Amino acid sequence: MNRMAPCGLILLFFALSFLVPSLDASEGDADPIYKACLEDCEKSGCVGETCFQHCKFSSDGKPIDGPWYLQEPLYQKWKQWDCRTDCRYHCMLSREEQRGNLGDKPVKYHGKWPFRRVYGIQEPVAVAFSALSLAIQFHGWISFFILLYYKLPLRPNKRTYYEFTGLWHIYGILAMNFWFWSAVFHSRDVELTEKLDYSSAVALVGFSLILSILRAFDVRDEASRVMVAAPLIAFVTTHILYLNFYKLDYGLNMKVCMAMGVVQLLIWGVWAGVTSHPSRWKVWLFVVGGSLAVLLQIYEFPPYRGFVDAHALWHAASIPLTYICWSFVRDDAEFRTTTLLKKIK
Ligand SMILES: [Zn+2]
C-alpha cells in the first residue's frame, strides 16, 4: 500500500463527517400509537400491566401518598420527571415489540435508539466498555509514570529527559475524566450527565489535537507551545460554553469533534510516514484503527437485540486503541531519553 492511501481514506471520512444527519429528529416519538401510550401512561401511571410508583398523582398534580415533607414542590417535580422517563421507556418497549412483531426495524425515540435497561442501567454494554477503557487508560498512564520516574534516568534537577512528560500527564487525566463521565452518562442519561460527557469528550479531543501538533512537529520551546495551544484552547473552551449554556447541539458537536479527531489522525499519519522513529508502526496501527473507529461514529445502526449499537462498538474499539497509544508513548519516552543522553555524552 502506498504511503498516501490511508491519508486519502481519512480525507474521505472528513468529507463524509459533514453529511452526518443531526441526531435531533426521531421517528419513534412522532408515532401516534406511542404518543397515545405516553399520554395515557402519564394519567394512569401504567403501561399495560406494569405500573410505576413515581406516577401516583391526584388530578391536581399533587402526589397521592407519602409524608408531608416529601410533598415539597421540588420533590414533586422529580417524581413527575421520573414518571415521564418511566412512561417513555415502557411505551417505547411496548411499541418496539409491536413493531418487531410486524417485522419493522427499530426507530429512534427522542433522538436515541431503543435500548434495553439492565438493573436500571440504560446502555450496559457502553458502560462496560467505558469502564474497561478507564481501567486500560489508568494502567497506561501509571506504567508511563513508573517508566519515567523509576526506570529511566532523571536530569540533575530531578526532571525527566523526555520533553513531553507534562503534556502526556494532562492527556492521561483528561482521558480518565472522559471515560468516567462516559460510563456515568451511559448508565443514566439526563441533561447533566449528557453535558458532562460531551464537555469531557471535547476537552479530550481538543487537547489531544494540541498534543499531536506539539509532538509531531517536535515543538519544544515554551513560547511556541503557547502559540499553538492558546487559539485551540480558546476554541475548545468557547465550544464547551456554547454546549452547556446556549445549546446542546448534537449535530454541531459531532462535527467539531470529528473535525478535530480527523485532523490529528492526519497529523499522526503523515508524521508516522516521514519519521524514522523505531515505534512508528504503532502510530500507523493507531491511525488505521482510529480511522475505522471514526467509521463507527458515522455509520450508526440500531442496537442489536437492544444492546449493542455502533456507539457501543466505538467504545469497544477505544480499548485496544488506548493500549497502543500508551505503548507508543512509553516507547517514545525511552527513545527520546536515550537519544538525548547520547548527545550529552
Ligand atoms: Zn459514549
Image: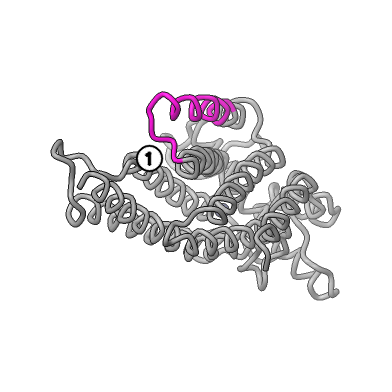
Q: Is residue 260 magenta?
A: no
Q: Amino acid at mark 1?
A: Leu
Query: Where residue 300 sits in the image (x, y, percent)?
Result: 72, 60
Q: Which residues are magenta?
A: 218-238
How would you rate the neighbour count of disc 1 (Cα within 10 Å): few for under 14, some for 14-19, many for 20 or more?
some
In the image, is 223 to the left or to the right of 94?
left
Residue at the image position 50 percent from the left and 29 percent from the top: 228
Q: Which color scheme is applied?
A: one colour
Look at the image and tell me whether residue 25 can be seen.
Answer: no
Looking at the picture, tell me which residue is in the foreground, 202 or 161: 161
Q: Total label count?
A: 1
Q: What is the quadrant of residue 157 in the picture?
A: top left
Residue at the image position 69 percent from the left and 42 percent from the top: 255
Q: Is residue 20 above or below residue 316?
A: above
Query: Where residue 172 sits in the image (x, y, percent)?
Result: 38, 47
Look at the image and tell me whether residue 103 can be seen.
Answer: yes
For label 1, the residue is: 167
- The image quadrant where one finds the N terminus is bottom right
Query: Where residue 267 sits in the image (x, y, percent)?
Result: 58, 47
Q: Main secondary structure of the magenta part?
A: helix
